[in-house]
Image: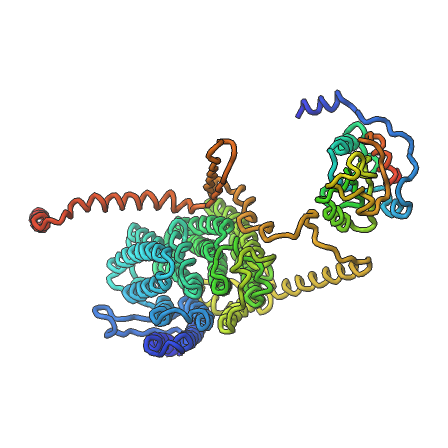
Amino acid sequence: MTGSLLATASGLCVVTAAAALFVPDRIRALVAGLGTAAAGGFGVAAGVAAALGGRWSVWLPELLPLAGVRLSLDALGGVFVAVTGGVAVCTALYAIGYAREHGRVVHGVLPLFVASLLLVPAAASVSTLLVAWELMALTSLLLVLAEHAHRPEVGKAGVWYAVMTHLGFAAVLAGLALFAAHAGGESFDQLRAAQLPPAARNVVFLATLIGFASKAGIVPLHVWLPRAHPEAPSHVSALMSAAMVNMGVYGIVRVGLDLLGGGAPWWWLVTLAAGALSALYGILQAAVSSDMKRLLGYSTTENMGLVLLGVGAAGFFAVSATPVLAALALTAALLHVVNHAGFKTLLFLAAGSVLRATGVRDLDALGGLRTRMPSTTVLFAVGALCASALPPGNAFVSEWLLLQSLIHALPASGVAGAVTMPLAVGVIALSAGLAVATFVKAFGVGFLARPRGGQAERATESPATMVSGMAVAALCCAVLALAPTVVLPALTAAVSAVLAGPPAVSGQVRLQLNGVIGTISPLLIAIALGAAVALLLGALRLVANQRARRRARLWDCGAGPMTPRMEYTATSFAEPLQRVFDDVLAPESDVDVTPVKESAYLVERVRFQSRIPDRIEHRLYRPVLAATAALGRSARKLANGSVHHYLAYGFAALTGALIILAVLR
Amino acid sequence: MASLWRKIKKTGRVAEPAPGRPESAGPADKVGELAGSVQIRHVDAGSCNGCEVEIASAFGPVYDAERYGARLVASPRHADALVVTGPVTRNMEMALRRTYEAVPEPRLVVAVGDCARNCGVFAGAYGVAGAVSDVVPVDAEVPGCPPRPEVIVAALRGLTGR
């Protein structure tokens, strides 16, 4: 059952890709969109079937030379396949209306990207995983570059993405190759059974952690993410941000917890620290960003940081013999993966809808979309509420579960846990607070008030296919927010696939934590909130109706009409935050005063420029890039065009190799 | 901080003793509804700033109008009364009308200084639209060029009734 569903999904992807290349332009978007959406639907079914007990594995020795293809879908992989399928359904429906202008390559590659995303969690051997991983990297790179002919920044973003993703691939390759060499086989079953020396285990874990973390956009390997996401077409951004980054988390859980079976506590403290750092740094950058898609990209770094924090906590609890908390933390992390996929799909698609209507991503030039794009506004509002970790949003539920696991750690774990866990609680609380500010800014400045530019003024609502894609994502978010228990059986099965122990969370309407004291009912919270708001509005109406009312002009200091220039912008909204976190963000501002020719005291023009560079990129990557460039320039002297020199190099290299061989043998 | 405390201790109270309660200057129904607390927005409709200096003095530590329940606020939306100074210039005519419109009911207007009452020395000037009473209804007037702070305080006490 699971196998045939997954095979149907992958087959549909390949057929759709082929069809997209050959059908006429007029119906290409429709064919590609419907085919990919159907494949996504089968992906969801396959993932759910695997998570609910339909474990499936297959070995296809003829498909790849030497090793063959080994696929297996258990509950853990099933959760990720189902998430990917869901995201694919929304984005493919959306792409029917959104990607009409894109060429046949984009339409043909998108289903292949979905297929690779479905196959990564189903891979059951090192070579299969690496092939699927590389297919995912290449197809996503082609999709990122889709609009390279129109904007030069796309090419630059593509180079960053290509380099970072392949460095990550090299790290994963090195780690898994070492693992397979020690294990004497490359299928996951052999890796699981292998007995590795501790040093090799450490190297394998660190190498794969680096590789997978770079895919998940974890600080300091996140630099590609805020570049590639804004420049890619929005439905591709949604797929990358909601489905592809999850694969990094999947890799860490699969290799660290499942194949290596736990390991040393410091592994997981490193993971936890990287997650905490990403959560804080990501949301801080998002809070001060005024580019809508860049903001969402940094928010992805934040959410993946939170997930990784949960995974790190789960690993730490698992190796420090508190399985109840480990299961709870991993459930919370996986639930956050699902939640993040829901709301980030919705937000990126809505941002794409705004981008299609206005052509701008800059929040400072938007505004006033509430009356011009009502559906997009409502859907973005739903996404923003879900992303800001407040009830009744869905991120609230997963972050609450994560906090529960960390809070209850205090008496159970040792000194390291007693120091780390309270700090982690603080990190989650701070990032949740900043997330609220970020999404209030994104929604309030981007959609409400009056348009700040001509392009926002001329915006019109997106076509029905795009709205329907977003609506499906919003519906999923609403279900996850009000009834998270519907995904609970799948998550519990996924957790028990890697961690021994009883299910951490149970319940129908209320989420009941097992082993520690704690219950929450998102549905009742939502109903109570709704009732409170209704009561408040009713009381206000009652009071207001008792007094005489007078219609008056908006107070504008007695001057002429208000102009959009008087509105708060995203930059001014974030200014207090920027001031508070001045030392961390290190904003650069530049004032350029030009005096008139006749007198130095009369100013002709003042130019003010302010930007907040990514400090990690500035400090960490610039020196490396500069050194590499210098090395390249100096190496150019070797290649001076003389054939005699080149022959001499060849001869010298051969002689050198022979001498080394002679000495070593 | 310590030096500030010392200064406060040394200076003591500089406010002049409160004179007896004056006759009510404003319309009795509005004054009654405001019940002794009047938030005031000051509008400079074209003043030479002489009256502003005196108003600042009336709310300074010596005359301390706030002890009678009058208080300056930053927006007409927060205000019960407008204190208008200067002849109403053409540039400020519409702004004064809108400021008056922005004050919630019941609202009071005090014209402070001779210019506000009857344009003073600026009467008939080309840039002047008229006295304050030509633009908005005036409830109380304070004569003088500029009026002394005591007179301003007395007029405000007429509004607060304290």
Which part of the image, by quadrant, shows the C terminus of chain B? top right
Side of A21 relative to A236 (left or right): left
The count of marks equals 0
A294 and A510: which one is in front? A294
B144 and A590: which one is in front? B144
Q: In this view, does A507 lie above or below A325?
A: below
Q: In this view, does A461 lie above or below A157?
A: below
Q: Where is residue B155 in the image (x, y as percent from the top left)?
A: 86, 36
- Residue at 65% in and 52% down: A561
Q: Is residue A309 above or below residue A622?
A: below
- Residue at 48% in and 36% down: A596
* Structure colour scheme: rainbow
Side of B106 relative to A594 (left or right): right
Q: Where is residue A71 in the image (x, y as percent from the top left)?
A: 32, 71
Q: Quadrant of residue B10?
A: top right
Say whether residue A72 is visible: no
A635 and A360: which one is in front? A360
Which part of the image, by quadrant, shows the N terminus of chain B? top right
Q: Where is residue A567 in the image (x, y as percent from the top left)?
A: 60, 51
Q: In which quarter of the image is residue A451?
A: bottom right
Say whether residue A197 is visible: yes
A329 and A447: which one is in front? A447
- Give the residue at the far top of this rendering: B10
- Residue at 36% in and 64% down: A146
Q: Where is residue A547 in the image (x, y as percent from the top left)?
A: 82, 57
